[in-house]
Amino acid sequence: MVAFIPSAAPERRGPPARDRRWRALWPAAAAVLLCLPLSVTAAERAKELLANALSLTANANAGGQAYAKNCAGCHGDKAWGVGESSIPALAGQRERYLLTQLIDFAELNRDAVEMHRANASLGVAPEQQWRNIAAYLARLPINPRPQRGDGKGLDNGSGIYRDSCASCHREDGLGDDTVGAPVLAGQHYSYLLMQIRGMASGHRFTNVDFDLALMLDNMSAADMAGVADYISRLGARPTTARALP
């Protein structure tokens, strides 16, 4: 049998061909199709856990204590994260989005060994603690000095962000609960770039719109870096709009 050796791919300078986009994403699509019954069940359970958590009364003070015990060791006392280690800032994030992510980590729908350990430390009935921690973090001020890129692709990045991202994440990067868009303002460049690459390659597809993944896959490496750098420079805003009533 003669082995097929593909030719070297040309340098990506613009949007790739349609078939190349699909080839890049087919492993994730195949995984979803093969595991569809399990995925549907997991999605239903996540929705149930979110509804249960939202039905509880949040105690931000208790959330602060739980955060200090279980989360601050990695994300910092102010929840501003660590850019050099690609540890995300959590302060000022939307409360509902924080809940969905805590649930995804607890249900192993997102990969991160440290987060799985932190969730396990919350006990067998963690919904109240999720609610409390999310309420606490949503009320913290956004990191005013996140890690930034080299600034070389800002013009390109700002144009892509306004054309393709601002409709959901808003021009100020504060996100929108109605479409499940998280706050991006105040986030570290390295973490933003890591997540953009992960979604584009299909390595992170939980709660990620397929059209979003295709749009990100259309970007060149320079596009991704420019967008991440631009987002990291969005200014902080008041936090009240991101906490649930």
Image (spheres, grey):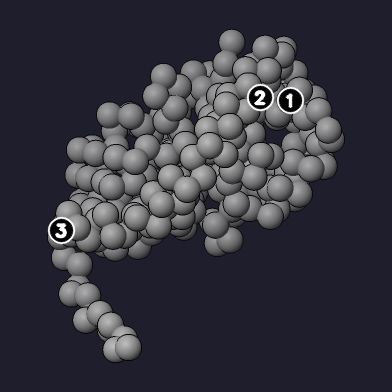
Q: Residue at x 20, y 67 (%)?
A: 12
Q: Secondary structure at mark 3?
A: loop
Residue 60 shown left or right of residue 191 in the figure:
right
Q: Residues within 10 Å of mark 1 (few under 14, many from 20)?
A: many
Q: Residues within 10 Å of mark 3 (few under 14, many from 20)?
A: few
Q: Residue at x 39, y 24 (%)?
A: 179
Residue 48 x/y as whole percent: 63, 21
Residue 71 shown left or right of residue 238 in the figure:
right
Which of these two is toward me, 134 or 53?
A: 53
Residue 162 x/y as whole percent: 23, 37
Mark 2 or 1 closer to N-term? Answer: 2
Which residue is identified by label 2?
49
Which of these two is toward me, 231 or 25?
A: 25
The amino acid on which the numbered mark 1 sits, given as a three-letter code, is Glu
**Count of numbered marks:** 3
Residue 8 x/y as whole percent: 23, 80
Which residue is identified by label 3?
17
Q: Secondary structure at mark 1?
A: helix
- Mark 2 touching mark 1, by CB under 8 A? yes
The amino acid on which the numbered mark 2 sits, given as a three-letter code, is Leu
Mark 3 or 1 closer to N-term? Answer: 3
Is residue 180 visible to us here?
Answer: yes
Residue 238 x/y as whole percent: 49, 24
Residue 71 shown left or right of residue 143 in the figure:
right
Q: Residue furthest front?
A: 1
Which residue is identified by label 1?
127
